[in-house]
Image (spheres, rainbow, N blue to C red):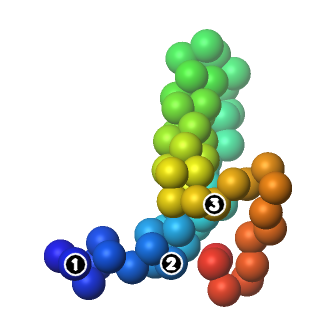
Amino acid sequence: LKNRFGRKDVVIQNHIRKLLEVEPCVKTSAENLQVLHDELNLHVRALGALGKDLNSSRITAAEI
């Protein structure tokens, strides 16, 4: 468990990968937009908690 969750770089990689794999919103209903917003927000907030501020830092190829 420690090997899997103790590796901050791997956790950051996974959140970045999930952001890149988010499915686009095909039907622009309020519900679908809320689901998209929630999914994006989940990963952005998790990255922020890990010290990765997406507003002021770059994502390197190694993190993807």
Residue 51 image offset from top left, x and y in percent = 58, 60
Q: Secondary structure at mark 3?
A: loop
Residue at 18 percent of width and 76 percent of height? 1
| Disc ID at residue 52 | 3
Residue 46 image offset from top left, x and y in percent = 50, 50
Vertical relation: 60 (above or below) 16: below
Return the residue found at the far top. 30
- Would you name the residue on which mark 1 appears? 2
Q: CA distance from mark 3 to mark 1?
A: 21 Å
Can you tell which quarter of the image residue 8 is in?
bottom left
- Would you name the residue on which mark 2 appears? 9
Can you tell which quarter of the image residue 61 is in?
bottom right
Alpha-carbon neighbours of circle 1 within 10 Å: few (<14), some, or many (≥20)? few
Residue at 55 percent of width and 44 percent of height? 45
Q: Secondary structure at mark 2?
A: helix
Mark 2 or 1 closer to N-term?
Answer: 1
Residue 40 in view: yes
